[in-house]
Image: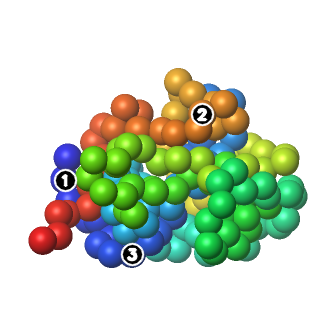
């Protein structure tokens, strides 16, 4: 695992698709692991992915699965058909960390990668989790689905 290209301290979003083509949006909280393919893609910088998602049309109702103080961004992505996962470990003690992205919002109508255009479709088609369905999975350990991943550098 490397840390060379990690967007240190930036809460950014990356995307992937699952075994049936549904889409997941993963918010890093500036600390969650990111598949290397996301950072090394030639289509769209990771810092621009959330903005590109929010330009998509509203197709769904976003439902929050856990209470959080500022749900607007998560609901906005779910309303565009994405299952939304967040790196909740950022606010946990070491003893309570799970090491997984946790689902915090779901769409009433999931968007399939086949209906994306341009850069988002290229990224979602290159980051595929073939062994799971976002509609069924509450938490995902990225290292079990992608190799290599890029972790945030340890700050200290």
Secondary structure found at label 3 = loop
- Could you tell me which residue is drawn at 33 percent across and 71 percent down? 7
Which quadrant of the figure has residue 70? bottom right
Q: Nearer the viewer, residue 70 or 120?
A: 70
Secondary structure found at label 1 = loop
Question: Which is closer to the viewer, label 2 or label 3?
Answer: 2
State left or right for residue 29 relative to residue 79.
left
Residue denoted by label 1: 2
> Mark 1 and mark 2: span between their CA atoms?
27 Å
Asked whether disc 1 touches disc 3, contact meaning CB atoms under 8 Å apart, the reply is no
Residue denoted by label 2: 137
State left or right for residue 155 relative to residue 123.
left
State left or right for residue 56 relative to residue 44.
right
> Mark 2 and mark 3: span between their CA atoms?
26 Å
The tag earlier along the polypeptide, 1 or 3, is 1
Secondary structure found at label 2 = loop
Q: Position of residue 147 (x, y in %)?
A: 30, 37
- Could you tell me which residue is drawn at 12 percent across and 71 percent down? 156
Q: Nearer the viewer, residue 29 or 109?
A: 29
């Amino acid at each position: 695992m490397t840390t060379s290209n990690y967007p240190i301290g930036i809460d950014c979003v990356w995307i992937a698709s699952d075994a049936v083509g549904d889409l997941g949006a993963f918010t890093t909280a500036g600390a969650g692991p990111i598949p290397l393919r996301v950072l090394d893609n030639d289509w769209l910088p990771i810092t621009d992915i959330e903005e590109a998602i929010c330009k998509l049309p509203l197709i769904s109702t976003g439902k929050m699965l856990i209470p959080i103080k500022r749900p607007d961004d998560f609901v906005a992505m779910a309303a565009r058909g994405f299952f939304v996962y967040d790196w909740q470990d950022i606010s946990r003690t070491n003893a309570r960390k799970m090491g997984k992205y946790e689902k915090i919002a779901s769409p009433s109508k999931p968007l399939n990668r086949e209906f994306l255009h341009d850069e988002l479709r290229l990224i979602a088609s290159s980051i595929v989790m073939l062994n799971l369905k976002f509609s069924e999975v509450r938490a995902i350990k990225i290292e079990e689905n992608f190799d290599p991943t890029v972790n945030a550098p340890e700050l200290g």
